[in-house]
Amino acid sequence: MNIRLVESRWDAVECDAMVLPLFEDEDHAQGLPAELDARLGGLYSELRETEEWKGERDQVTVFYRPAGVPAARLILVGAGKRSEYDTHSIRLLIQKAVRRVKGYHLKRVAIYKRSLIEAPMAARAGVEGAVLAAYEGDDYKTLEKSKDFIEEVIFVTSEAVDRSAIEAELTRGRIVAEATNFTRQLVNQPGNAINPPILAEQARTMAEKFGLDVEILGEQELREEGMGGVLAVAKGSDEPARFIVLKHRRGPEDENPIVFVGKGVTFDSGGLSIKPSEAMEDMKCDKAGGCAVLGAMRAIGELGLERNVIGLVPVVENMVSGRAQRPGDVIRALNGKTIEVLNTDAEGRLILADALTYAQRYHPQLVVDLATLTGACVVALGHFRAGIFSNSEEACRRVSEAAERCGERLWRLPLDDDYRTLLKSPIADIKNIGGRWGGAVTAAKFLEEFVGGLPWCHLDIAGVDQYPPDFSIKGATGFGVRTLVEIASGGFLAEHG
Ligand code: BES
Ligand code: ZN
Ligand code: ZN
């Protein structure tokens, strides 16, 4: 997709569709609404009088071939209240507007920037919205496949702007959103299409293309390392485990890296503590954290960030068989701690335990893990914010701010030591479940045992890895890619490296 900046009035750009965001609470006697009304010969006020158009968030109306405007279509998108307009709303409204007209076989779509948000960040969010809209999770449809003909996105602004700053953000937005679509595409693949070896090979292909060093550990190496958590979960599956290591080394030699860790369960049946069928339906998505790490590493490689960043993804399939681990089994994790596995469905923490231990060999200045870890986090926060847990105020603030900047919303949950007592095992160092209440916290508390005191944030993305059930867009969101890229490019290293 080609992306271009044009400094112009909205009504002077030739394109197949011009997207115009309009607020519900703006003065319609001046500015864009007034110009629009004049251009449309009063049709805009007429539309508003019918109350068909209010400018409420996500409303979309299309004017075809309006006289006197070079755009073939004007797409009015409701931008909601002015005070609530941010980069998150820009991204989403552009995504929805572009999706709305996607079936129309358009080639050039223009986005008009309203003046409230500084141009570079608005440009980035706008392009992200357009690129995200281009992805359709219909790889498996043989009929009615979507045809994506959008070839060019034109970012239009009539303000005086710093061209190079905007162009840099347009490129960045495209790269990050394409990486997010890569993640979405991976997450959407069903369990019969992707298993640990296949996902690892896809990671290798991606790494080679985007200039990352890649190392993939197989079962033999996992045994030699002593990754008892990864191996225990993989035991029940016919597919062997893999451990993906991606390295982007473009920072100074002596700069401690940031390490990203992602849960890569290609399918979670629950194991012998088997899930009821309804809860199992979506469990191909249990690799979303790992795929987000792969997508972020791809973007970091393509952007050529001058940082040292490492991505770790333990990949397993959690299945039922005569070789599956049993509730009550005691296993030994990579750091030597013994774990009483009382519920085989609490498998994510077992593989992350080894990955977090593995991370320590790089002496990271920051570790961030992403995992579809607990149903309890979905109960707590629903589908709009992911949970963040951290052992460091500073790390938590930096990660939260990075997430906020790129429109991925987090909410901090606690890590008090009181919760640790719930994980006491009578026979081993720790058990892998903490009882019914506060399940997202006890899971995070479990992980904390394996981070070796390093500055660490855990993001439980179980509620946000897919668009909400009643949402117009379906499937994986790619949540986390933007935040990880933002963390890697942010000032954290400069201040703490
Ligand atoms: N992959 C699930 C968590 C999950 C639930 C992700 C819903 C997305 C949507 C995880 O492995 C799991 O099964 N967790 C258990 C933990 C419990 C056994 C302590 C859960 O949340 O029920
Ligand atoms: Zn599970
Ligand atoms: Zn799981």
Image: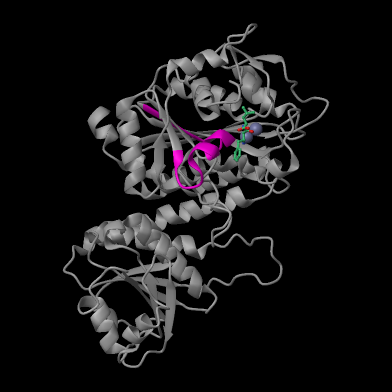
Front-most of residues 457 and 30: 30
Q: Residue at x 70, y 71 (%)?
A: 143
Front-most of residues 387 and 95: 387
Compared across the picture, whether 258 is left or right of 317 comes to left
Q: Residue at x 66, y 19 (%)?
A: 223
Q: What x and y, as percent, mark residue 164?
A: 22, 61
For residue 374: magenta?
yes
Q: Quadrant of ligand 1?
A: top right
Compared across the picture, whether 418 is left or right of 6 comes to right
Quadrant where the N terminus sits is bottom left
Q: Which residues are magenta?
A: 366-386
Question: For the view shown, which residue lies furthest in the top direction?
Answer: 427
Res 453 quadrant in image = top left
Res 309 quadrant in image = top left
Q: Residue at x 34, y 24 (%)?
A: 392
Front-most of residues 325 and 359: 325
Q: What x and y, as percent, mark residue 222?
A: 63, 23
Q: What x and y, as percent, mark residue 238?
A: 77, 34
Question: For the view shown, which residue lies furthest in the left direction?
Answer: 160
Quadrant where the C terminus sits is top left
Compared across the picture, whether 269 is left or right of 310 comes to right
For residue 232: magenta?
no
Is 111 above or below relative to 283? Answer: below
Question: For the view shown, which residue lies furthest in the right direction?
Answer: 322
Compared across the picture, whether 328 is left or right of 426 comes to right
Numbered label tally? 0
